[in-house]
Image (tube, rainbow, N blue to C red):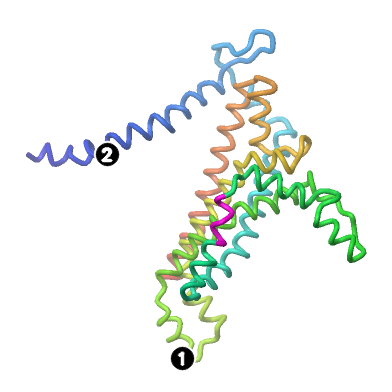
Amino acid sequence: MKLVARSTPWLLSAPAMLLFSSLLLLPLTLTAVLSFNVFDYNTGVKNIFTWAHYAAIFTDDYYFEIFWRTFWIAGLTTLICLLIGAPEAYVLSRMGDPWRTVFLLIVLAPLLVSVVVRAFGWSMLLGPRGLVNQVFAFIGMGPFKILYTEWAVVIALVHVMLPFMIIPIWTSLQKLDPGVENAALSLSASHFTTLRRIVLPQVLPGVLSGSLIVFGLSASAFAIPGLLGGRRLKMVATVVYDEYLHELNWPLGAALALILLLANLLVMLSYNRVLEGRYKKAMG
């Protein structure tokens, strides 16, 4: 009976573990194996072990620039989403029905539209004759080159990723008892002190979750950098696409994808460690 009791959790979780292994671990393993294969433009992929692709990535300034651009854009997108999303989530949590429902639907509405459609919409707005440059021309400024720049990619990514920041923070704020905040205010604490000492420690888990989601999705984004960045403004996902479908150099594309995954995990785990440390310190 003890043996059955011990094996029951494993048996119950076996289907989920099998599905996880089939859909995630197995493709990652095959990608890792592919990244160590030799590639020849005349004969294609050869089943011969080599470190050449990783050596090329780590020794070429071209790839260093692409990775730097990718994480710089992802970090800036995360910061802007946090600066916009946190106050918006706070206001949303203080709203009553039916306005809360209305504004929550407005926040989630962009998720109902395809990323490609939104990218095309921003390309029309940010183009040389788009609405943004027309506004600048009306006030006697511009036109500015916005499309096919890093700023165009950041603007579109913020629009796409903002709901992923607002919802986790709003969920954390739902667990906060308004009476605690009111008690702090009744004891002559300023609104800034109340936000810093009462609200902020409570919403740190939501900030952490939202930041990790936004950063991870932004660093691996493909459609927006491809459509708004153009052919010259490369990010890692667009380079992987080019290596797989244009150059047909699958091992190099696999190596780039794995390095992006590992770099993403390293940044996210470091951020998680720092923010969790501050959360424990604030709550302790």
Badge 1: residue crowd in 10 Å (few <14, some 14–19, many ≥20): few
Badge 2: residue crowd in 10 Å (few <14, some 14–19, many ≥20): few
Image vertical order of residue 256 relative to residue 93, above or below: above
Quadrant of the image containing the C terminus: bottom left
Q: Main secondary structure of the magenta part?
A: helix
Report the disc number at residue 272. Answer: none
Q: Where, by quadrant of the figure, is residue 221 drawn?
A: top right
Q: Which residues are magenta?
A: 106-112
Residue sitting at 38 percent across and 31 percent down? 21
Q: Is residue 91 left or right of residue 117?
A: left
Q: Closest to the observer: 139 or 201?
A: 139
The spot of residue 15 in percent (x, y) is 29, 34
Residue at the disc numbered 2: 13
Residue sitting at 27 percent across and 39 percent down? 13
Residue furthest out toward the left: 1
> Earlier along the polypeptide chain: callout 2 or callout 1?
2
